[in-house]
């Protein structure tokens, strides 16, 4: 049997049958099952307040031109191919890959409080988080993302039927009171200055967080306040997770904050990447816990690459297959070298065109099952 397993890397034999269907405590334990997002059906959102603060001023033209329409077909095709190829690579490593449903996100919808059209199901990391044996749908803050969870509902139902604990956090109404419209209209420098003082585009009227503002280190979770995650959202998370987990708020000099996974990325127990352009303000907390924080290497992306939703620091947005093996974008050679020098086996995979949609390997995935159990890592 031992030999057979070695000769035939059959995913169903390799997957650990004794693990609960949903089981993931950190970002690095051996990966068994993962949801990989899709760009099919993606639409360009209208310039709502929370989107306006996240994008960069030079992109206004793109949003004005395409708002409410499907993403340009040639962008979708090339990014979809990259994602499909990535899925096959994961499968070759024995990982079970699941995909969301295809939804036409350009459809408009009307709730009691607002009207909008959708965005995409490209980034499961933004909407779903697995904390131990529970999978939580995040409440989110963009009107264009209100119904994003729908693309994952068949998967959630399946996991639920197979015994998973499935929670949807209370969604904000996203009514006008929820946003600071004036904030969104201010020039970038003023917005940055306000963010520095702790003002964000969403108010604290109702809980809100994106799952990608949280990073998991076993019993300890780190979360950042951002333009999509508010204090009352963090309070909801803390109260919901109770005493089993500890939720710490961390800060970065990032004046466009949305999603922590291009700022703080743990690689294995005791070692995490940080973003040298926005170094974590709580470095001491990590040092005291015995963690080394290593500066990520900058991206090799050309300056004129279309980036509508994020910075090129998504080069550090890697996916760990286990504590020794990491998927890194194929053209990010400096990042690859850094990780190799730190002793990792690096798997280079093409995903550059996904950057244009706002993320890389960590964003486009949600690890549903990793081997391993609840542990503490020095905090
Ligand atoms: N806001 C980050 C940056 O621009 C990108 C984070 C993307 N992460 C995600 N889960 N979508 O550097």
Image (tube, rainbow, N blue to C red):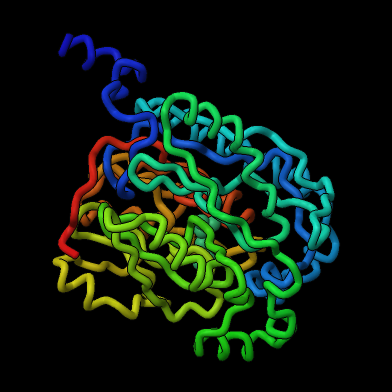
Which quadrant of the figure has residue 372?
Answer: top left
Towards the viewer: 264 or 213: 213
Residue 128 locus on image (x, y percent): 50, 47
Q: Quadrant of the N terminus?
A: top left
Q: Residue at x 64, y 62 (%)?
A: 172
Q: Residue at x 23, y 14 (%)?
A: 5
Which quadrant of the figure has residue 282?
Answer: bottom left
Decide if residue 23 is on the left or right side of residue 227. Answer: left
Towards the viewer: 131 or 36: 131
Decide if residue 107 is on the left or right side of residue 269. Answer: right
How many numbered marks does the figure carry? 0
Q: Is residue 8 above or below residue 185?
A: above
Q: Is residue 288 above or below residue 172?
A: below
Residue 92 locus on image (x, y percent): 39, 25
Q: Is residue 329 above or below residue 100?
A: below
Decide if residue 83 is on the left or right side of residue 163. Answer: right
Q: Residue at x 60, y 30 (%)?
A: 154
Residue 150 locus on image (x, y percent): 66, 40
């Amino acid at each position: 049997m031992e030999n057979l397993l070695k000769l035939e890397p059959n995913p169903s034999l390799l997957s650990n049958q004794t693990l609960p269907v949903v089981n993931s405590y950190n970002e690095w334990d051996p990966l068994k099952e993962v949801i990989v997002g899709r760009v099919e059906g993606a639409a360009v959102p209208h310039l709502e307040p929370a989107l306006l603060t996240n994008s960069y001023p030079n992109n206004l033209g793109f949003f004005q031109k395409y708002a409410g329409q499907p993403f340009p077909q040639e962008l979708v095709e090339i990014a979809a191919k990259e994602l499909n190829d990535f899925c096959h690579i994961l499968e070759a490593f024995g990982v079970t890959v699941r995909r969301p449903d295809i939804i036409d996100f350009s459809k408009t919808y009307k709730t009691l409080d607002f009207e909008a059209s959708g965005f995409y199901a490209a980034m499961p990391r933004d909407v779903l988080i697995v904390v131990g044996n529970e999978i939580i749908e995040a409440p989110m803050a963009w009107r264009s993302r209100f119904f994003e969870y729908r693309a994952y509902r068949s998967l959630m139902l399946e996991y639920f039927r197979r015994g998973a604990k499935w929670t949807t956090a209370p969604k904000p109404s996203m009514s006008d009171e929820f946003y600071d419209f004036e904030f969104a209209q201010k020039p970038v420098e003023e917005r940055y200055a306000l963010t520095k003082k702790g003002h964000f585009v969403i108010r604290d009227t109702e809980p809100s967080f994106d799952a990608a503002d949280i990073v998991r280190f076993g019993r300890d979770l780190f979360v950042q306040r951002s333009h999509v995650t508010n204090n009352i959202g963090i309070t909801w998370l803390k109260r919901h997770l109770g005493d089993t987990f500890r939720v710490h708020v961390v800060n970065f000099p990032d004046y466009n904050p949305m999603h922590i996974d291009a700022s703080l990325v743990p690689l294995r127990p005791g070692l995490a990447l940080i973003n040298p352009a926005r170094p974590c303000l709580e470095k001491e907390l990590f040092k005291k816990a015995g963690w080394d924080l290593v500066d990520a290497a900058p991206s090799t992306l050309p300056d004129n690459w279309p980036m509508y939703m994020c910075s090129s620091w998504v080069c550090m947005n890697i996916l760990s297959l286990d504590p020794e093996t990491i998927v890194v974008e194929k053209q990010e050679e400096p990042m690859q070298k850094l990780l190799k020098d730190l002793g990792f086996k690096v798997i280079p995979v093409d995903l550059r065109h996904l950057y244009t949609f706002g993320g890389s390997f960590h964003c486009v995935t949600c690890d549903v099952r990793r081997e391993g159990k609840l542990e503490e890592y020095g905090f």
